Amino acid sequence: MNRRRSLILTAAAGLLAAAVLAALVAIPTADDRSATTAAQPSPAARPDSDDRRRGHTTVRIPAGRYPIGSTASPDESPVHRVALRAFRIDRHEVTNARYVRYLNGLGIRVAGDAEPGAVAADVFRSRDAPLFIEGDEGEESDPLIALDDEHARIGVRDGRFYVAHEWADHPVTEVTWEGARRYAARAGGRLPTEAEWEAAARGRAGRTYPWGDDRPTPARAVFGRDSGQTLPVGSRRSGATPQGVNDLAGNVDEWTSSLHRPYPYDRADGREGWPRGSEERVTRGGNHVYSSAHEMRSAYRAGFSREPDRGHRHIGFRVIYPDTR
């Protein structure tokens, strides 16, 4: 009996020792705790994580005084500095796929099918048709997007909006200024002012182009192409800003919130208002049909064919958001 008790006690002592050893191994050392902490996402990275859930990422532009304008054109003069708060800007232009998700979230009733570029008013209820049908020049329709234009990449099928797979990652075009503004508001952001756009493209150093001062090449920007021949967003990574914002030169021009008024920029002088009418809004960034380096500069603000109540095959947009840091 004593021998059996001794064996039991010996076994119990062995099990207890093994348990203590396992517990000691499980306790993290200072180095372990440091490594675990380093692996956690920093607070600064959280906005990007939130953006990935929405299908895209943003880049933070810090607060500061940024150089605006140039001496290359009277329209860009005088050179001056503008004080800006920090903000976050879309890394890429809004794509057809993202805009389709927005349209399908509006609760629009669609009857019938129509291929992209061939959408007509009869697939919508009469009250909804003006949101998508541009009509002839001079008509007061002011749609969100001109789906009846031959260069529109979005159609309707089985009661929903859709984009052909090969165009899904291209920047959305034919969106009016109001259509871009409403999308941005629904996404929790807004269109950038032209000063914010230029600050994101040129930085505090006042770069000539988003990537620096070297002239554009086909490896850096989408330009010198036939009308309507865009490429997927982010196709020219070597043309990104040092912070990683893509396609700020080429592919498509981009709507800003600003009315086209003379410099110096002053957001309090009415240029950031929302008057109804055809006064032109500033577009920035150059586009795929431009062929000169002059037009691809980040200070260039002349643009062409940018009536805010019409869709345009060469104009898209991106969104900025409040900085949450």
Image (cartoon, rainbow, N blue to C red):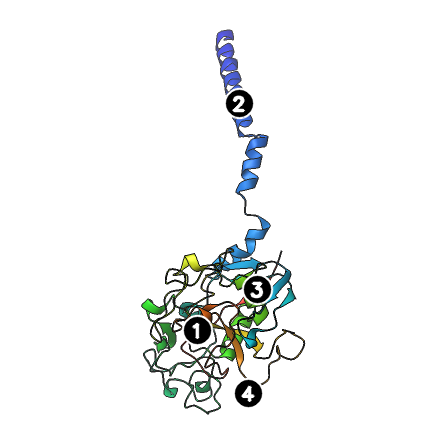
Disc 1 element = helix
Secondary structure category for the residue under label 3: helix
Mark-to-mark CA distance, 1 and 4: 27 Å
Mark 1 or mark 4: which is in front? 4
- Which of disc 4 and disc 1 is earlier in sequence? 1
Marks 2/3: CA distance? 59 Å
Q: For the residue carrying disc 3, how many other residues have a C-alpha within 10 Å: few (<14), some (14-19), or many (20+)? A: many
Q: Do the residues bearing badges 4 and 2 touch, measured as CB atoms within 8 Å?
A: no
Whether residues under marks 1 and 2 lie with C-beta atoms below 8 angstroms apart, the answer is no
Q: What residue type is labelled 4?
A: Gly
Identity of the residue drawn at 62% across and 78% down: 271
> Residue 136 placed where, x, y %?
41, 90
Residue occupying the point 42% across, 57% down: 238
Hey, what amino acid is under mark 3?
A: Ala
Q: Is mark 2 on a helix, strand or loop?
A: helix
Q: Nearer the viewer, mark 4 or mark 3?
A: 3
* Label 1 with label 4: CB-CB less than 8 Å: no
Q: Is residue 37 above or below residue 21?
A: below
Which residue is label 3 attached to?
Answer: 199
In the rendered image, the quadrant that contains the C terminus is bottom right
The residue drawn where x is 61% and y is 72% is: 78
Q: Label 2: which residue?
A: 21
Residue 220, image quadrant: bottom left
| Marks 3 & 1, CB-CB < 8 Å contact | no
Instruction: State the separation of the CA atoms marked 4 and 2.
Output: 78 Å
Mark 4 highlights which residue? 277
Number of the label disc, if any, that sits on residue 104: 1
Distance (Cα) linking label 4 and label 3? 28 Å
Q: Which of marks 1 and 2 is in front?
A: 1
The mark closer to the camera, 4 or 2, is 4
User: Residue 121: where, in percent of width, then height?
Assistant: 39, 87
Q: Nearer the viewer, mark 3 or mark 1?
A: 3
